Image: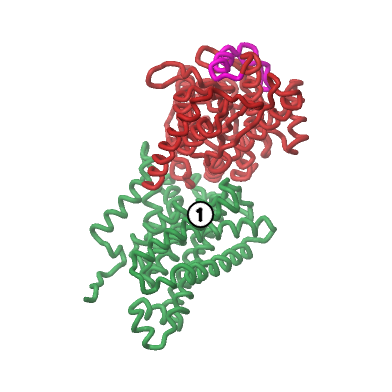
Amino acid sequence: MEYVVQQLINGISIGSIYALIALGYTMVYGIMKLINFAHGDVFMVGAFVGYFAAKAGLGLILSLVLAMIVCALLGVIIERVAYKPLRNASRIVILITAIGVSFLLENLGIFTLGAQAKGFPDIVNKQQYHLFGGVEIDSVQVIVLVTTVVLMLLLQYIVHYTKIGKAMRAVSYDLEAARLMGINVDTTISATFFIGSALAGAAGVVFAIMYPSVDPLMGIIPGLKAFVAAVLGGIGIIPGALVGGLVLGIVETGVQSFEGMSLWRDGVAFGILILILIFKPSGLFGKNVREKV
Amino acid sequence: MKLSKKLIAVTAALTMTLGMVGCSKSGSNGDTIKIGANFEMTGDVAAFGNSQLQGIELAVEEINKDGGILGKKLEVIKADNASKADESTRMASKLITQDDVDVLLGATTSTNTLAAVPVAMDKKVPMLTASATNPAVTVNDKTGKVNDYIFRACFIDPFQGTVMAKFATDKLNAKTAVIYTDVASDYSKGLQKFFKQSFTEQGGEILAEESFQTKDTDFKAVLTRIKSLNPDVIYVPGYYQEVGKIVKQARELGITVPMMGGDGWDAPQLVEIAGADALNNTFISNHYSPEDPDAKVKNFVDAYKAKYNVVPDAMAVLGYDGMYMVADAIKRAGEVDHEKIKDALANTTAFEGVTGKIALDKEHNPVKAAVILEYKDGKQVFKDKIQP
């Protein structure tokens, strides 16, 4: 019993990280229909900003805010420079550009910061809580889960109850029609990237606190996993990212909790992606939407 | 992926043509002896590569100050393999065919060294690795024949695994153990195999063998299972980046038993990642300790500190010893010739290095002592020295 509970805690804690990254992924996709592969690398930049902020003696909140601001600006710059000129190009062109941006950020990171992993300073006073029968949980795990849920609710609020959110949904529904209705499409898309990248920055810092090392290629695997989580929950649907992330985390942990299965984790994660794409391409929370002809 | 394969093909074609040009003159006829250094200057284990290069450069500086070898100065040509096996292969052939080096040094890890072995064997250039501990580096796995151009300056995985098993049973009174191996690393698998063998021979029981992969970040699922098995010790033969996270997460889950590993743990980043507290009650086997009272060790540590302002780690001392071992062999060979240097290296019988007296056995493996270090508040403390 304790064993199951402990594994469940492990699963939820890693799942909430996936969910946090997946939120930004899914939001950009929801508005722009673009899988922003550079998202994982913006996440990496966020972790590094957090690293330097923490080294400079800033605390958790300040490091987090700083990382979110830097990443938000970076996201807007990326959108303006790389994606905006391609607004009318076919979707595959923008997708390839996103992959290009991702490589650019990774290699720029290696070039300027070196490929070596650096240890992340302790900025959270970690509390260890002993629950019944040797079950352990620590404050970082709780912080991550709470951060994720709060940010998801905030995002849900922005998208559904604010003016910019309404504009986002309109752009998502039909970009041309939105423009005709007087919505400033470019600003709306920039806002989308601003928020999405800020989320990636937050996730980067939180990730680095939980697994205390940062390196320029650290965004690749979490980025991919978050993508799986987003697809699992239904890409473009904000609560779907949370559920998808948690399900993925729990499944991965569950697989590893059986003897001799420690290497099956990634296989199962990507197997789920394939199954979802075959049987329910719109994800757990998705509705089937007919393409207009 | 496809692109990099194409790149390799193109490079291979290029190196083949260049190789033919290079063959026309054997060895270097210039006034320097060229040492090709194929190292991990960037990437996952860059800490190892850079440390070893510093050790090598210190040795070269000293040798050149004393007038070089056979009247010639040593010249180190560095190549970065980015901690990747395929890059290591490329860099080895680049050094041989383009730079026409007389001796190859590197790489630091077994995986990257194994990738360079076929190149050196094929081009018949003597190669010495100072720290690759996998047996297959000097003895071909498939044919069982000795790779006659490949040498090493460190003890091998069987010895590290055996030493740690001995230490666990004798000093830690361990009856049961769990092994947690990096399946993506030849080094890790080598240590795992020999630890298991000698631990069971001494009456211990292996409760479980778990695995992870390089680049993993979350280990809690498997660690929770290990915790439920309640072993006396946990053996984690991996590299510092993953090991640091494993140790940290294990302690967070309330695993308090001793954790042990090999020289792959030995990097300053380990303490940054795991935290000093989590590292208490962990033990590693290593090549040397800067606290060793031996005079030779002390002189080296002082010289290294004077030049780089840090205490040398094992990689640095191995690089230093490796360079001197090569220099010693070239001196004994009497001329700068691939064949003669190779034969002289094979005949190393009483080389006095900082890490101890080195004699190479028939399989080009040094017979020398190992030290056990314990982490106390983030510092390595000399615990024991175990003779072969």
Residue B334 location (% of width, % of height): 64, 14
| Closer to the camera in the image, B26 or B42 | B26
What is the residue that sits farthest to the left in this orientation?
Answer: A293
Report the residue that reaches farthest toward the bottom: A181
Residue A26 position within the rendered picture, expressed as x and y whole percent measured from the top left: 40, 66
A89 up-or-down from B333: above or below = below
Determine the colour of chain B.
red
The stretch in magenta equals B336-360
> Which is nearer the eye, B116 or B386?
B116
Up/down of A147 relative to B328, above or below = below
Residue at the image point whose x is 44% and y is 27% from the top: B118
Which amino acid does the dot numbered 1 rest on?
Answer: Glu
- Identify which residue is drawn at 27% across, 70% down: A287
Q: Kindly tell me whether residue B138 is visible in this rendering.
A: yes
Q: Percent position (x, y) of residue B226? A: 46, 37
Specify whether residue A24 is painted magenta. Answer: no
Magenta stretch encompasses residue B354 = yes
Judging by colour alone, the chain drawn in green in this rendered image is: A
Quadrant assignment for the C terminus of chain A:
bottom left
- Side of B218 relative to A236 (left or right): right
In this rendering, position of residue A250 left or right of residue A66: left
Identified at 24% across, 57% down, the residue is A278
Badge 1 sits on which subunit?
A
Report the residue marked by disc 1.
A106
Q: What element carries label 1?
A: helix
Question: Horizontal and vertical percent for residue B388?
Answer: 58, 15
